Amino acid sequence: MQNEHTSQFDNTSDNDNRLKTLEAEVREAIASGTHIRETVRRLTLEAMNAKHIDLESLQRIITAVMDGVHDGATHQLQHATNQAHAAKSQITEAVAGLDSALAGFAEASKLAVQEVTSQARKFSDTELQRTRSDLESLESLFLDTLHRTGTAAQGVIAEILLDLSQHAKNNGTTVGSQLKETLAIFAQQIAAVGQSQLETGATLAQKTAEFVGKITQGVLSGIKDKSK
């Protein structure tokens, strides 16, 4: 039992360190002011490239990214005058990069299901149902974290984040658009229960991680960044 608890503690500590690193790297991306959208997208996808990832893990990743965006933009405003316009551009680019990365994760989940379906195989019903439930909450998780970060912020940063949050709710998100397609594929696979499909040896999480890795490396086209 002691070894088990030690292992769990080590994993938690390791995850915390990775999230702190992610937050710091996003903060640095804001500070650099160049290729923000692409950098945030890549960093987020890399953080999601794990064999075991659930809604709680995604929430912590999204929060770490948004904390990095907030801190980076705040630092910029404190150390330069007349930077409100630049801060808006930087935050908008970073949020678009996060949105695009989440869409990439949703796409990877879809591709994982499509691959095993093409082999007349399927993932376990339990995992399919659980993952579908997580995916159904993904856009709300993104929007809620964006709004919460804006509410906790102050001044210009708060205005920018809350404006982006409202705009995303009114006009939709990249991840929301991709989720419609992904969830339709999940519904088809779940409805196929009872057909002559054998369960695949790999888990959906493992396969999704493989496709996330390919999207991150540019092996697959992935989701294109869109300006909102």
Image (spheres, rainbow, N blue to C red):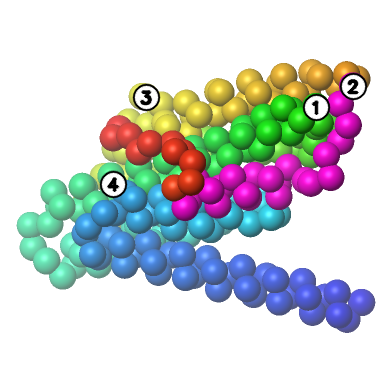
- Mark positioned earlier in the residue sequence (2 or 1): 1
Residue sitting at x 35%, y 38% = 225
Categorize mark 3 by other alpha carbons within 10 Å: few (<14), some (14-19), many (20+).
Answer: few
Residue 92 % position (x, y): 28, 44
Q: Distance between the residues labelled 3 and 2?
A: 43 Å
Residue nearest the observer in this picture, 197 or 98: 197
Which mark, residue 2? none
Q: Earlier in the sequence, mark 3 or mark 2?
A: 3
> Does residue 98 appear in the picture of this structure?
yes
Q: In this view, does 30 lie above or below 17?
A: above
Instruction: Read off the magenta span.
Output: 196-217
Q: Main secondary structure of the magenta part?
A: helix
- SS class of the residue under badge 3? helix
Q: Report crowding for label 2: few under 14, some 14 to 19, many 20 or more residues within 10 A (C-alpha).
A: few
* Residue 93 marker: 4
Tag 1's secondary structure? Answer: loop
Asked whether 39 or 23 is in front, the reply is: 39
Contact? badges 2 and 1 (CB < 8 Å): yes
Q: Does the magenta stretch include residue 201?
A: yes
- Type of residue at label 3? Asn
Residue located 44% across and 58% down the image: 43
Measure the C-alpha gap from mark 2 to mark 1. 8 Å
- Among numbered discs 4 and 3, the one appearing first in the sequence: 4
Alpha carbon separation for disc pair 4 and 3: 18 Å
Name the foreground residue: 199 vs 36. Answer: 199
Q: Compare residues 195 and 87 and report the one nearer the observer.
A: 195
Q: Give the amino acid type for the residue marked by disc 4 in the picture.
A: Glu
Left or right of 112? Residue 143 is left
Relative height, residue 170 to residue 77 (above, below): above
Which residue in the protein does label 3 denote?
170
Question: Considering only order in the chain, which callout, 4 or 1, is on the residue closer to the N terminus?
Answer: 4
Q: Mark 2 points at which residue?
A: 196
